[in-house]
Amino acid sequence: MALIVQKFGGTSMGSADRIRNAALRAIAAHAAGDRVVVIVSAMSGETDRLLRLARDIRAVAAEGRETELTVAAIAAAGRELDALAATGEQVSAALMALAIQELGGRARSFVGHQLKMLTDSAFTKARIKTIEGTRVLEAVMAGDIAVVAGFQGVDDKGDITTLGRGGSDTSAVAVAAALGADVCEIFTDVDGVYTTDPNICPSARKIDKISYEEMLELASLGAKVLQIRSVELAMKYQVPIHVRTSFSNAEGTLVTNEASLEEVVVTGVAYDKNEARVMFVGVEDRPGIVAQIFGDLASENVSVDMIIQNASKLSDNDTLRTDVTFTVAKSDLQKVRAVIDGIAKNVGAVEVRYDEDIVKVSIVGLGMRSHAGVAAKMFRILADHAVNIQAISTSEIKVSCLVAAKYTELVVRALHDGFGLAGPAADPAPEAAAADAANR
């Protein structure tokens, strides 16, 4: 008798028919003799609807008067936004439990405070501290299917918190770890993890088994199938994840600590369009200047990804000057642009240049650790297609290149084929993967 955690995303919970379909899956696992815990997301689009309501209310309430955006005001808004957003998952949990009951099964629903998922107080992006799970274990031991609202917990004061976008994935893996589950099944609208995006590359193939390290890199580099924090938790606590579609009974992709039996150098190709390039032009090249730039960025909570520094050259006044380039999330650029401009002025940069028309394309694979020339081959493929590389970053199992956004599809396909990842033409599920990722 196994203990299974099943997680259903927003698309899988998007209508009464889909909730019924998810309920039947939970009942089937229970009927096979397994103990089952179900984690649910809000119905597709529900979280966005709730947040739009919050924006409308705040806009109407503030009409005709100035509002001061103090730290206290931001914290207070975050608390209420979490209380609001968490209701989407609570609705889903109750509906799922009702569906299971109507189909002849036994189910009880639980929200964050009943599960006793304790988090810190970082509203809208809380991190899990502990999970008690006693009531959930009691329910499954009594023969019930426990249905848990994902995405949420409570802090030390008892206030509702949410875990950020993709938080239901994190909830599912955390619950699986806390309860000692045998597997965490992530039901989504794609039938597994692919070698790259099938919407760009029809020859992409489903990967039967992938390591935690490879999945973590792919998730951090733009793959949307699993949320990064969920993979981190799975790797830390050795929780096997089975990514599979909720629209068929096909086997999906197993994310585990076991390496693939295949001798594969590159496992997948990922791309991320949420990158913006920032260049400090003509910074004085002396010890400590780079430390000052990135120390000031860190103190302002500006997360930096790729970094490159050009060779020094003499300026008109015989001072050594250099250009320092880095990337930030495009979605954060407008919020941090004033901060970046201020830092550039403090370090005496001649000017600051911004470029949002870029994409980061990456190759990932455990086999890269023991094979030489992988990066060189990647660079040669890009050169053969006349694609200029603007920045490079590497780790033991990945190489990332920054290129112009107009080359995205060309580069993804060229790298995918160049490293021999092509298989039979993929037939992805009709739903777009992004829809489920946005509502987990």
Image: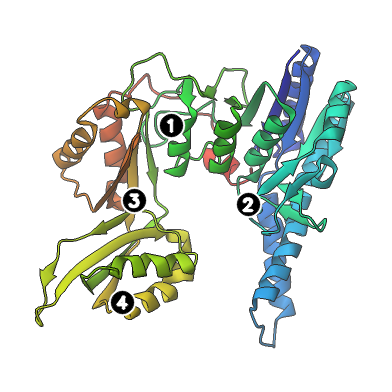
Instruction: Report the residue at 45% width, 32% height from top.
Output: 213
Q: Quadrant of the N terminus?
A: top right
Q: Who is closer to the viewer here, 331 or 431?
A: 331
Q: CA distance from mark 3 to mark 4?
A: 28 Å
Which amino acid type is marked by label 4?
Val
Q: How far from the left and from the top, in percent, is residue 280?
A: 28, 70
- Frontmost of labels 3 and 2 is 2
Q: Disc number at residue 214? A: 1
Q: Is residue 150 visible?
A: no
- What amino acid is at disc 3? Val
Separation (CA) of disc 1 from disc 3: 20 Å
Secondary structure of the residue carrying numbered label 2? loop
Q: Which numbered tag is attached to residue 164?
A: 2
Above or below: residue 302 compared with residue 32: below
Q: Is residue 360 left or right of residue 122?
A: left
View extreme (bottom): residue: 65
Q: Residues within 10 Å of mark 4 (few under 14, many from 20)?
A: some
Which badge, 3 or 4, comes first in the chain's sequence?
A: 4
**Up-down: is 305 above or below 142?**
below
Q: Which mark is residue 254?
A: none
**Residue 278, x across and y down, in percent:** 32, 65
Q: Name the amino acid type tagged 1.
A: Glu
Identify the residue under disc 4: 347
